[in-house]
Amino acid sequence: IRGLSGPPDHLASAQVLNLRRPAVQGTPFADAVPYRVAESRQAGDGSLYLKFDGFDTPEAAKTLKGMEIVVPRAAAAPLAPNEFYIEDLKGLIVIDSKGAQIGVIENVIEGGGGELVEVVLENGVRRLVPFRKEFFGDISLGQGSAVLTALWVLE
C-alpha cells in the first residue's frame, strides 16, 4: 500500500484494517469491511506490504486492488505542524483578520495544483479559494475558525 496521507508505516502494527471501494460514499465506516492482517513489512520505497487472512494467492490478493483503507482518527497518520485533515477543515468559520465572519468552509477539493477550499459566504455565494498560506493565516481547529488574509480572492 501507499499512503495518501503520508507514509503508511503507522499501519504496520495494525491487526485489523477496514477496507472499502473508493467509489462508495457515505460515513467512513458504514461501508467498510474489517480484514485481519496476517503479516506486514516495510518496503524500501516507503510503501507497506500487507497480507490479509484468507488472501493466500496472488489472484485472491488482486481482488483488493484499488481499495481504500479507512481507520479511526486514533490510528490515522500523524500530522506535522500546520497540516490538517480535510475533514477537519469542513465546517470551519472563515473570518477576516479582525474577526468578522465571512463564511463557512463547506468542502475541500483536491487537485493537481493543491487543495481548493469551497467557502459559502454569508450571502450564500460560493467561492473557491486556494488553501495556501498566501490566503489563509491562522487555522484554529479548537476555535473552529480559519483566518482569510487576502479578501480580494473572494471577488
Image: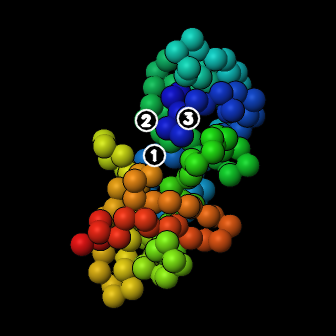
Where is mark 3, residue-wise? Answer: 6
Where is mark 2, residue-wise? Answer: 66
Where is mark 1, residue-wise? Answer: 21
Query: As displayed, is residue 131 above or below residue 10?
Result: below
Q: Nearer the viewer, mark 2 or mark 3?
A: 3
Q: Looking at the image, what colour scheme do you see?
A: rainbow
Query: As displayed, is residue 73 above or below residue 99?
Result: above
The Cα–Cα distance between marks 2 and 1, rounded to whole angstroms, is 7 Å
**Front position in the image: 53 or 10:** 10
Q: Amino acid at mark 2?
A: Gly
x 33%, y 85%: residue:
124
Using residue 20 as the reference point, say whether residue 72 is left or right of it.
right
Q: Secondary structure at mark 2?
A: loop
Query: As displayed, is residue 113 above or below residue 47?
Result: below
x 44%, y 67%: residue:
148
Q: Earlier in the sequence, mark 2 or mark 1?
A: 1
Residue occupying the far left of the picture: 155
Q: Earlier in the sequence, mark 2 or mark 3?
A: 3
Viewer can see residue 108: no
Q: Amino acid at mark 3?
A: Gly
Q: Secondary structure at mark 3?
A: loop
Q: Amino acid at mark 1?
A: Arg
- Asked if the residue at tag 1 contacts the one at tag 2, i.e. Cβ–Cβ closer than 8 Å, the answer is yes
The quadrant where residue 76 appears: top right
**Front position in the image: 67 or 98:** 98
